[in-house]
Amino acid sequence: MTKRLLLAVACIAGASMVSAQNIRSHYVSKAEADGVIYHTFPVTLFENRETGDLTFDITYKENRGGRATINFTCRMPDAVPADSVRFAAGAVTMSGPVGKLYLEPGKKDWKHRYTFDADGSKLCGFFDERALPEVTVYVGGRASVYSVKRSAWRSYAPIGYKIFEMVYVNEKR
């Protein structure tokens, strides 16, 4: 119950900074017997100067204890699987161990695809357009940092916020 209250406060507090956005083209939802599942379409908001972009999507299903699944794809020079990831924006941090979905060779690097379990109550707060978020992927003791593409973030953050505000409102019904 405390997580839901925190999510409600975060969503209500940020509502004033969200302009009218058409969010429908950025996610899909499907009603299932045990709750609605929401899935955001992949979006590329982060980059690493050496290795390229990081693309991610989020899946949230009602009645899963407030948990969300974040899948992401990035490029790295080696075929060494990552251990964990950290998505941080302002005061919000979502981090944890990753599950490898696949590694695929490219011309000069490797395409990595991972999944991790995140606290869904932090999603509204993560999409704060005033924040300068970054994603850090950990491989062994080495960290690869993917910085936000500022113009892409300013465009997408209000959309991401509105999507997860809608998820919260629908789940509490």
Image (tube, rainbow, N blue to C red):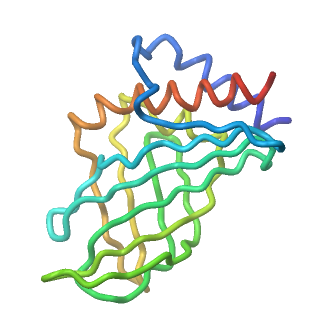
Who is closer to the viewer here, 56 or 26? Answer: 26
Residue 93 image position (x, y, % from top left): 53, 50
Q: Residue at x 38, y 57 (%)?
A: 135
Q: Is residue 113 above or below residue 14?
A: below
Q: How many marks?
A: 0
Who is closer to the viewer here, 86 or 167? Answer: 167
Position of residue 102 in the picture relative to residue 150 (left or right): right
Residue 47 image position (x, y, % from top left): 23, 56
Q: Residue at x 35, y 46 (%)?
A: 43
Q: Residue at x 50, y 79 (%)?
A: 83
Residue 125: quadrant of the picture: top right
Residue 100 image position (x, y, % from top left): 50, 78
Position of residue 39 in the picture relative to residue 153 (left or right): right
Q: Residue at x 43, y 44 (%)?
A: 41
Residue 140 image position (x, y, % from top left): 43, 86
For the N terminus, the image quarter is top right
Q: Is residue 110 above or below residue 148?
A: below
Position of residue 1 in the picture relative to residue 115 (left or right): right
Q: Is residue 71 above or below residue 98?
A: above
For the C terminus, the image quarter is top right
